[in-house]
Image (cartoon, grey):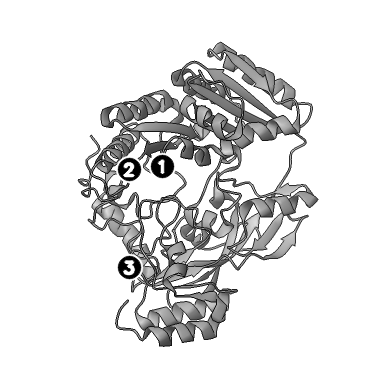
Amino acid sequence: MPHVDRPALIRRLQSIVGEPYVLHRPDDLLVYEQDAIMVNRHLPDVVVLPDGAEQVAAVVRLAREAGLPVVPRGAGTGLSGGAIPERGGVVVALTRMTRVLELDPEGRTAVVEPGLVNAEFTTMLARWNLFFAPDPGSQVASTIGGNVANNSGGPHCLAYGVTGNHVLGLEVVLADGTVAWVGSRGWDAPGYDLAGVLTGSEGTLGIITKIAVRLLRRREAVRTLLAIYETMDAACAATSAIIATGIVPEALEIIDGVTMRAVNRTLHAGFPEDAEAALLVEVEGVTDAVPAVMERIEALCRAGGARRVQTAASAEERQNLWKGRKHAYGSLGVLARNAIMLDVCAPRSRLVEAMRAVAEAGRRWDVRISNFFHAGDGNLHPNLLFDFEPTDPQFARVVGATEDIMRACVRLGGTITGEHGVGIEKREYLPWLFSADDLAAMRRVKDAFDPQGVLNPDKIFPTGRPVHGAPAPAGGDTA
């Protein structure tokens, strides 16, 4: 912490949010030193839990006066280190701000606070036969504010789009402590799309305190299919074949054999132990139309070499299939002490090549890899498994495999992150995608919103510092 009277700062913060909502003891701060990335840790100087935009604004003004950085935080489920306070400072945890402030079922819009948990919101909306489409794998814990900050995706974003497609407007606390509204509570606001700029900005441009979202009406019918394949190549090829016909399912997911065996050990899900991959397909629509679409998909799966195709016969069976997919990451604990989930993208038509590159990276660096991913839009999630600590020299193998996978995706025409954000984890790799002029233009946007660099510093943009303890990669080298 800079030369700040810490006790006085704590007292002033307590006067803003209340004494119970300022955390400053070492044991309390430990909870906020990392997010779900798990291999980077930095303690904040203090954590505050505000209960509204005015409190957030007052905290930002005080932190700025004290010369301290401010790091917004949701549920801590992020996987890029975006909520890790690398420079210490004040973490603003938004988990008390959980209210649904406005709801218009007929207009299918709502205004919510950022701490509202994604799955709880959709459960609440069931009463009106509505839902909030973005459904990241962490939705039972992740907050809508965090989803907006990272422009999160999820299995059903193949058909419905990522979080940004469902954001109408935002209330945001800017770096100088002012409160502004961007976008609209309605459709198609005029002017610059500042809500679009803030969505996916990872807390580097402002702290989101209210979110106006659009809602969707549930479809009449939903069917879910699981196809089992002997090879990953066949499952990937089937994905492209389905989309090539013009069918766009609500979800099109792949789970590999390593993951299926882990899920069986934790949930007794009944996945085949000897298959290399499974394709999970979900279709929603008009009751009379869905069966015909499912028949076409089943025929395509069989023609592509599926050894078994099963359609969930009940809502319970469908939920069990999705339970296996949604709990895949948590099941990896039976395979290794540590895991890093990557978030890379490849063109859907080149999935076979991308997954071969993932397997080759694992062999080259002797790192075991589990895969479950959003195959329909080419958003891959290789999980690198290891039993040592990130401080161990062996961790260089994990970093090597990570870089090989990202290079391969860029070479194939993809990108280094799809929905988890850049944060700490990917910042040094941006020169693989963007020129110096590109990055300078982005930096000018950051400077316009936050000229003093108060908000979530050292995220997104390259710093030249090591990633996970490895040397910073060479800029522009994706060969």
| Callout 2 amino acid | Phe
Which residue sits at x=40%, y=51%?
Answer: 38
| Callout 3 amino acid | Arg
Which dot marks residue 337?
1
Task: Identify the mark nearer the N-term, 1 or 3.
Answer: 3
Q: Are marks 1 and 2 in contact (CB under 8 Å)?
A: yes
Q: State whether residue 192 appears in this view.
A: no
Q: In the rendered image, which residue does mark 3 sit on?
A: 87
Location of residue 188 (image quadrant): bottom right
| Callout 1 amino acid | Arg
> From the viewer's perspective, is residue 184 above or below residue 301?
below
Which residue sits at x=57%, y=57%?
Answer: 143
Q: State whether residue 309 appears in this view.
A: yes
Residue 341: horizontal and vertical position, in percent? 42, 42
Q: Rounded to the nearest whole Å, what is the CA distance between mark 1 and mark 2?
A: 7 Å
Label 2 crowd bin: few (<14), some (14–19), many (20+), radius 10 Å: few
Q: Are marks 3 and 2 in contact (CB under 8 Å)?
A: no
Q: In this view, does 98 lie to the left or right of 175?
A: right
Residue 458: horizontal and vertical position, in percent? 32, 62
Task: Identify the mark nearer the N-term, 1 or 2.
Answer: 1
Q: In the rendered image, which residue does mark 2 sit on?
A: 388
Q: Rounded to the nearest whole Å, what is the CA distance between mark 1 and mark 3?
A: 28 Å
User: 64 or 286, which lies in front?
Assistant: 64
Task: Identify the mark nearer the N-term, 3 or 2.
Answer: 3
